[in-house]
Amino acid sequence: MATRLYDVVLDAADPAELARFWSALLGTGIAEEHADEVCVTLVEGLDLTFVSVDEPRTGKNRLHLDLASTSAEHQAALVARAEELGARRVDIGQGDVPWVVLADPEGNEFCVLERRDEYARTGPVAAVVVDAADPVAQVAFWAAATGLPVAREHPGYASLRQEAGPAVEFVRVAGPKRGKNRLHLDVAPPADGDLPTEVARLEACGAVRADVGQRGVTWVVLADPEGNEFCVVTPR
C-alpha cells in the first residue's frame, strides 16, 4: 500500500483569477470553484489547485511547471497566448536555451518547452520541476511518495514518469531553500488506506512534520528530505 500523486497546489493571492489564467492557457476546464480554492483539470485524476494565501511571493519559486509543445509553431503560439493572458518573459539566468521562461500574473515562473517526444503523452503540462541539491536522493524519496517509477537518474537531474500526466523532475541547483514553497504536491492513500500508517511510512522514508500555519485540518503536512512541503490528504 502506498500514496499516489493527487494534485499540484499553487498558493495564490487571487485563486479565481489565477485559475482563469491557467485554464485558458492550458485549454482545460475549471473542475471546482470555491471562495478560497479553485481546481483546474490537468489530466483525468489530477488537478492544478489554487488556494488562497495572504503571504506575498518572495524570490524564485523552487518548484515550477514546464509546458509541452508539439512543434516550433505550437511553442510560439503558447508563448504568445500566455503573454496575451498576462504572462511576461523573465530572466532567471537561463542563458541561450530552446525553451522560453515566463512568469504568470502573480509572478510564478514556468517554461514553455520546445517539442520533445518524451512529453507526447503528458497532456499540456510536461513536468513539475523541483530544484534539488541531490536529484538522485530526491527522486528515490518521491518514488516512494507517489508510487511513480524512476525514469532516469543522473547527478544533475532525475525524473519520475506516469503513463498519462506530467512527469516529476528534479534538477540540481545551487543555493538552499528559503521560506515556504508556493507550489507543492499533495499525495493520497488509496480509498481503503490509512492516513496515520502512510504518514509513518513517509516519515520512515525521510519526511518530517511541517508547520505552515495549518490548524484543524484533515490532512497532514510534511516536508521531504530537502524541506519541500507537501500534504498527505485523507484516503481516496
Image: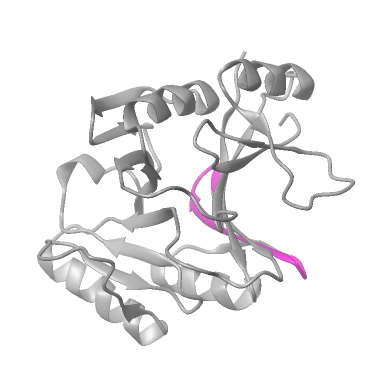
Residue 151 drawn at (x, y percent): 28, 26
Task: Say if 50 sits above or below 87 in the image.
Answer: above
Name the foreground residue: 105 vs 38.
105
Q: Residue at x 67, y 24 (%)?
A: 190
Q: Nearer the viewer, residue 24 or 170?
A: 170
- Which range is magenta? 34-46
| Position of residue 97 measured from the top left corner of the image (x, y, whole percent) | 12, 61
Q: Is residue 163 left or right of residue 193?
A: left
Q: Is residue 39 magenta?
A: yes
User: Which residue is farthest right?
Assistant: 216
Q: Which residue is depicted at the point 34% across and 40% down? A: 169
Q: Main secondary structure of the magenta part?
A: strand
For the residue pair 147 and 47, the one nearer the viewer reads as: 147
Q: Is residue 99 above or below residue 80?
A: above
- Classify residue 95 by image quadrant: bottom left
Q: Does any portion of residue 126 appear in the rendered image? A: yes
Q: Is residue 73 left or right of residue 144?
A: left
On screen, residue 206 above or below 169? above
